[in-house]
Image: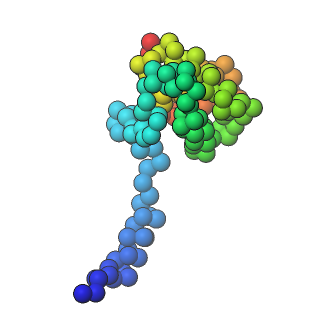
Amino acid sequence: MPRAHAPRSVILSLLCATVVCPPPLHATDEAGNYAVWGIGQASCNQFVKAAESDATEDFGHYLAGYLTAINTVTAGVHRIGEGQSTKDGLATLQKYCVDHRMDSFERALQAVLRTEGEAGAGSKSAPDATWGRPPSPQ
């Protein structure tokens, strides 16, 4: 039995609706929550244990993608992480995570970037304060 195909007019209508009504850039709910995928969901404790056994490759890939995303979508920012290797970034995150083992790896990234952004406020490498939802105050 042949498969039924959607009429071209339906497909064109859907494409036009997608162009006219694009989804919002930030996919957060009213409370600022958003989904975190992959190794970013891991706890700082899991990251510290991985670092102790030199098993941080996945965390390094996540870090590189995270920084690329910030540099891509945050207005006025284009060089976060410049001059630092992934290994350097992971070492900085490990220092943070040793003292904040209950935070997620993704929250640790936010906290470290915020701290570095405050140190270099006004620079093109400072993260936009609206990126993601900030970790709870300590």
Give the residue displayed 45% in from the left and 24% down from the top: 46
* Among the 4 quarters of the image, the one containing residue 52: top right
Query: Residue at the spot x=55%, y=30% of the render?
Result: 55
Of the 4 image quadrants, the one containing the C terminus is top left
Give left or right: position of 122 versus 108.
Answer: right
Instruction: Using the rendered image of the protein, determine whether residue 127 is visible from the camera's viewpoint.
Output: yes
Residue that protrudes farthest toward the bottom in the picture:
1
| Residue that extends furthest to the left in the rendered view of this protein | 1
Work out which quarter of the rendered image holds the N terminus and state it. bottom left
Task: Tell me residue 43's x, y (percent).
Answer: 43, 25
Is residue 83 left or right of 5 when viewed as pictured?
A: right
Residue reaching furthest to the front: 53
Q: Is residue 63 above or below residue 94?
A: below
Count of marks overlaid on the render: 0
Visible residue check, residue 112: no
Give coordinates of residue 24: x percent, y percent: 44, 50
* Place of residue 61 in the rendered image (x, y in percent of width and height, measured from the top left): 57, 39
Residue at the spot x=55%, y=17% of the render? 96
